[in-house]
Amino acid sequence: MSKRGAGRAGLVLAVLLAAGPAAAEVQVRYATPERFTDAENRFASGQPLRVTLAELTRILVDLGNARLRPDERLDITILDIDLAGFDRPGFASPTGIRVVTDATPPRIRLAYALRRGGRIVAQGEDTVTDINFLLTANPRFSTGGLYYERQVLRDWFARRFPAGSERG
């Protein structure tokens, strides 16, 4: 190898090392979203389905990147969504009106598979919900949508995928 070739190879290696470890990978899929229990406002106000799914994907990817090891891949298939609260008909506004009570917790049914080195190390199907969601959440200090859903998913990630050293 010439000095020029060795120099380029060294530069490429230095750039790769400086970039740090690879991030965990999170893949999110949706099984028949048009049939979900409640993932969009059905009264022509509020967020459309595509916006809800995009926000939910962003939440799951962010949580996965924060909790998973760099060598892990998490595949999530969302089977059903029931957002916190219910739509209030008769109020057509750009943001929509959603009434949230302690009797209307968010509920997300999902299947997951966690892979490490290409091997499945954990998998299952869960219904992510919390009937006490109003006691533990404070949306006044929230930014972004799907605040209650983000809270229950954050709790699910913490229970299902404890810190890396605790998983072995």
Image (cartoon, grey):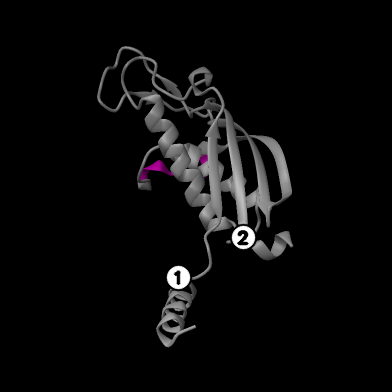
x, y (%) of residue 128?
A: 61, 36
Q: Residue 17, how many percent across, how many down?
A: 49, 75
Q: Which residue is mark 1?
A: 19
Magenta part of the chain: 135-140
Point 40% across, 19% down: residue? 87
Number of the label disc, if any, that sits on residue 71? 2
Residue 84 visible in the current orientation: yes
Tell me which residue sits at (48%, 28%) in the image. Answer: 83
Q: Are marks 2 and 1 in contact (CB under 8 Å)?
A: no
Q: Quadrant of residue 105?
A: top right
The mark nearer the N terminus, 2 or 1, is: 1
Q: Amino acid at mark 1?
A: Ala
Q: Amino acid at mark 2?
A: Asp
Neighbour class for label 2 at 10 Å: few (<14), some, many (≥20)?
A: some
Q: Going by the image, does 160 lie left or right of 148?
A: right
Q: Pick the quarter of the image with the C terminus.
A: bottom right
Q: Is residue 87 above or below residue 50?
A: above
Residue plotted at (35% across, 14% down): 43
For mark 2, give the secondary structure.
loop
Is there any visible trace of residue 137 in the rendered image? Answer: no
Measure how far apart labels 2 and 1 are at the Cα level.
15 Å
